[in-house]
Amino acid sequence: MGQVFLHDEWPVRRVVEIAQDWLAVEVIEIGPGGAILTKALSTAGIHTTAIEKDDRFAERLIESALPGVDVVNQDILEFDLGAWIDG
């Protein structure tokens, strides 16, 4: 798995700002990894479905119990987007 992690705060802030500008109340985050964006979205009150294939990262994210974050330990290619949209 080729993984790239966010380390700087400015892209995270910018993504959250854009989500807020679009009045997003719910988003899907693919591969949250260390969860820097997930935490920022949670703090901003944006419900996040975090889809993480790597068991280690998914477990850490579940243990963090961030408010408004649902963790799905699954490959995005197997995720049922239609069910999520209809949900």
Image (spheres, grey):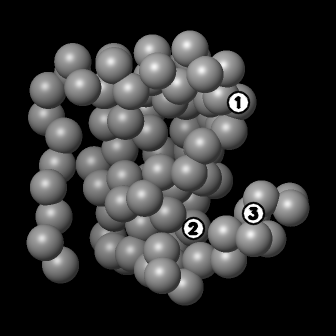
* Vertical relation: 19 (above or below) 32: above
Q: Amino acid at mark 2?
A: Val
Element type at mark 1: loop
Q: Measuring from the top left, give residue 64's x and y in whole percent.
A: 47, 45
Q: CA distance from mark 1 to mark 3?
A: 14 Å
Residue 25's tag is 1
Which numbered disc, 2 or 3, marks the residue closer to the eye? 3
* Vertical relation: 2 (above or below) 77: above
Element type at mark 3: helix
Q: CA distance from mark 2 to mark 3?
A: 11 Å
Q: Quadrant of residue 53?
A: bottom left
N-terminal of the pair, mark 2 or mark 3, is: 2
Is residue 23 in view from this perspective? Answer: yes
Q: CA distance from mark 1 to mark 2?
A: 18 Å
Q: Amino acid at mark 3?
A: Trp
Q: Quadrant of residue 52?
A: bottom left
C-beta proximity under 8 Å, tags 1 and 2: no
Q: Residue furthest front?
A: 22
Q: Measuring from the top left, give residue 74's x and y in whole percent.
A: 50, 78
N-terminal of the pair, mark 1 or mark 3, is: 1
Q: Measuring from the top left, give residue 5's x and y in whole percent.
A: 17, 49
Q: Which residue is mark 2?
A: 72
Q: Measuring from the top left, give residue 45's x and y in whole percent.
A: 64, 22
Q: Quadrant of the C terminus?
A: bottom right
The residue at 31%/26% (across/down) is 12
The residue at 33%/74% (across/down) is 54
C-beta proximity under 8 Å, tags 2 and 3: no
Residue 84's tag is 3
Q: Residues within 10 Å of mark 2 (few under 14, many from 20)?
A: some
Is residue 60 in view from this perspective? Answer: no
N-terminal of the pair, mark 1 or mark 2, is: 1
